[in-house]
Image (cartoon, rainbow, N blue to C red):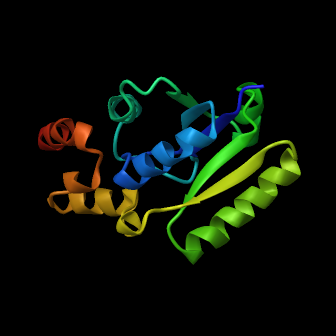
């Protein structure tokens, strides 16, 4: 049976930390689906089509990675895609506490789906999408925190805002 993992998030925008987690997860799974979920608690800065493009550009040529969107419970989406794993990146103990609670609830909803935690590489622990959006809001240069393959397009997009 194919080992399929879902890496859910808003990816608003994708960061070097996200990219690192996916690339480190690839040897563990046959396929990784980067799933952009609709978070009812979050208003995104970047449009969905742009986020999809940036993720696709980041993993261009990586055959066992694909990008999809969903708007239901993550465990239900996993079931639809025959995925038995949810990947989550952890930067610190605060992330762990938050993600542990979600993993426990997900396990209550569907015990067949396992959450796999990957520790963020130390050099990426300070990077998150919220900080990038804040830098952009104040006119700062944020592209250094993004995957190299999307930096030029990101900067071009920001100038058009």
Q: Is residue 10 something that shows in the picture?
A: no
x 39%, y 60%: residue: 128
In depth, the one of 134 and 2 nearer the eye is 2
State whether residue 136 is above or below residue 36. Answer: below
x 37%, y 24%: residue: 61
Q: Is residue 35 left or right of residue 55?
A: right
State whether residue 104 is above or below residue 112. Answer: below
x 67%, y 53%: residue: 116
x 65%, y 62%: residue: 99
Q: Is residue 21 something that shows in the picture?
A: yes
Residue 64 at x, y = what percent? 53, 27
State whether residue 87 is above or below residue 35. Answer: below
State whether residue 104 is above or below residue 160. Answer: below
Residue 30 at x, y = what percent? 62, 30
Dividing the picture into quadrants, the one containing residue 142 is bottom left
Q: Is residue 133 left or right of residue 143?
A: right
Q: Residue pushed farthest bottom?
A: 93
Question: Which quarter of the figure is the N terminus placed in?
Answer: top right
Residue 9 at x, y = what percent? 53, 46
In depth, the one of 116 and 1 nearer the eye is 1
Residue 152 at x, y = what percent? 15, 38
């Amino acid at each position: 049976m194919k080992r399929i993992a879902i890496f859910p998030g808003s990816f608003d925008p994708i960061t070097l930390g996200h990219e690192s987690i996916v690339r480190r997860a690839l040897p563990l799974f046959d396929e990784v689906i980067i799933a952009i979920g609709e978070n009812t608690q979050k208003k995104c800065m970047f449009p969905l089509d742009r986020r999809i493009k940036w993720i696709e550009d980041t993993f261009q040529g990586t055959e066992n990675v694909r990008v999809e969107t969903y708007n239901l419970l993550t465990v239900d989406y996993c079931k639809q895609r025959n995925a038995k794993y949810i990947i989550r990146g952890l930067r610190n103990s605060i992330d762990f506490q938050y993600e542990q609670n979600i993993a426990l609830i997900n396990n209550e909803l569907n015990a067949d789906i396992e959450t796999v935690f990957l520790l963020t590489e130390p050099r990426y622990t300070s990077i998150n999408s919220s900080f990038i959006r804040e830098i952009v809001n104040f006119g700062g240069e944020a592209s250094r925190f993004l995957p190299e393959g999307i930096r030029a397009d990101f900067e071009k997009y920001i100038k058009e805002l």
